[in-house]
Amino acid sequence: MTIENWQRGFVLHRKAYSETSLLVDLFTEETGRLSVIAKGARAKRSAWKGVLQPFTPLLLRWSGKGGLKTLTKAEPASIALPLQQTALFSGFYVNELLCRVVEQETPNPLLFQYYLQCLTQLASTEKEVEPILRTFEFQLLKILGYGVDFEHCAGSGLPVDEEMTYSYREEKGFIASMIKDNQTFYGRDLLAFQQLMFNSPEVLQAAKRFTRLALKPYLGSKPLKSRELFTQHILHLK
C-alpha cells in the first residue's frame, strides 16, 4: 500500500541498518507508530542526513506492505524543538515510552497531540519538567485503556476522602487502607491526579510513584535506557 498524502510525524528512535541506511521508528499523526527503512540516509550526500532527527517536526511519506515500510519522502515542517539538558533527557524518555508501550500502526491523533504538546512545553522550560512528564504519563495511560477511578473507593464506591489513605490494586483501583507502603496514596493526591494538577512537591512525588506502578505491566522488567542515561549525566555533573 502506498501512502498518498503527507503525514506529520516525529522520529522516536533510529539505528544503523546495512552500510548506508537507517531503521527509523516514527510516530505520525494518522498512522501512529511505525518502522521504516530510510535507504541511503547514512550516505555522505544524503538529503536526510540532518533531517531524520528526534524532536524535529517532519512531513513524511512512505510505501510498502507488512510491518517494515520504506521511507520515500521526509522534509522538516519547522525547525527542531530546542530541548536542552534535563528537558532533552525528558524528551528521550517520552520517546522511549512510546516505543515500548504503543502498538505499531495504531492510529491515535489525540496521543499525537498530547506528544506534540509535551515536547513544546519541554522546549519552553528550563527546570520544571516533572509536571509536564507526569501529565503526559497520565494521558498515555488513559489512551492505553487504563480506566481506574481516582474519585471513588473501589471497595465501597464512596467518594474519595482527602484525608484518608488508599491502597492501589492493579486493574481494580484504590481501596481504603490503613496500611502505608509504596502503593498507598492520600485521597487528596488521587483527586489531584484526576484533575492533572501537579502543583506541589508532595503531589508530584506521589504521581511519579503511581505512574511507575501503573506503567510497569506495559514496560516489563527491561530497564529504560533513557533513565540510565539521565542518571549517568547527573553523576557526571557531580
Image (tube, rainbow, N blue to C red):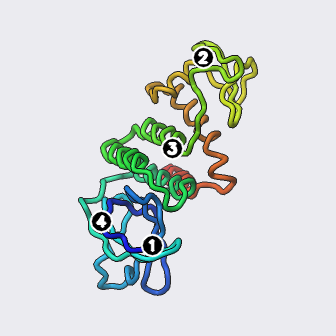
Number of numbered labels in the structure image: 4
Report the amino acid beneath label 3. Answer: Ile
| Real-space CA distance between mark 2 and mark 4, rounded to the nearest whole angstrom | 47 Å
The answer to which of marks 1 and 4 sits earlier in the sequence is: 4
The answer to which of marks 3 and 2 sits earlier in the sequence is: 3
Report the amino acid beneath label 4. Answer: Trp
Q: Which mark is residue 143?
A: 3
**Front position in the image: 121 or 215:** 215
| Real-space CA distance between mark 3 and mark 2, rounded to the nearest whole angstrom | 24 Å
Tell me if mark 3 has few (under 14), some (14-19) or many (20+) residues whose alpha carbon lies within 10 angstroms of its own. Answer: some
Q: Which mark is residue 6?
A: 4
Residue drawn 24% across and 59% down?
78
The answer to which of marks 2 and 1 sits earlier in the sequence is: 1
Q: Position of residue 184 (x, y in %)?
A: 68, 26
Element at label 2: loop
CB contact under 8 Å: marks 2 and 1: no
Which residue is label 2 attached to? Answer: 160
| Real-space CA distance between mark 1 and mark 4, rounded to the nearest whole angstrom | 15 Å
**Front position in the image: 218 or 148:** 148
The answer to which of marks 3 and 4 sits earlier in the sequence is: 4
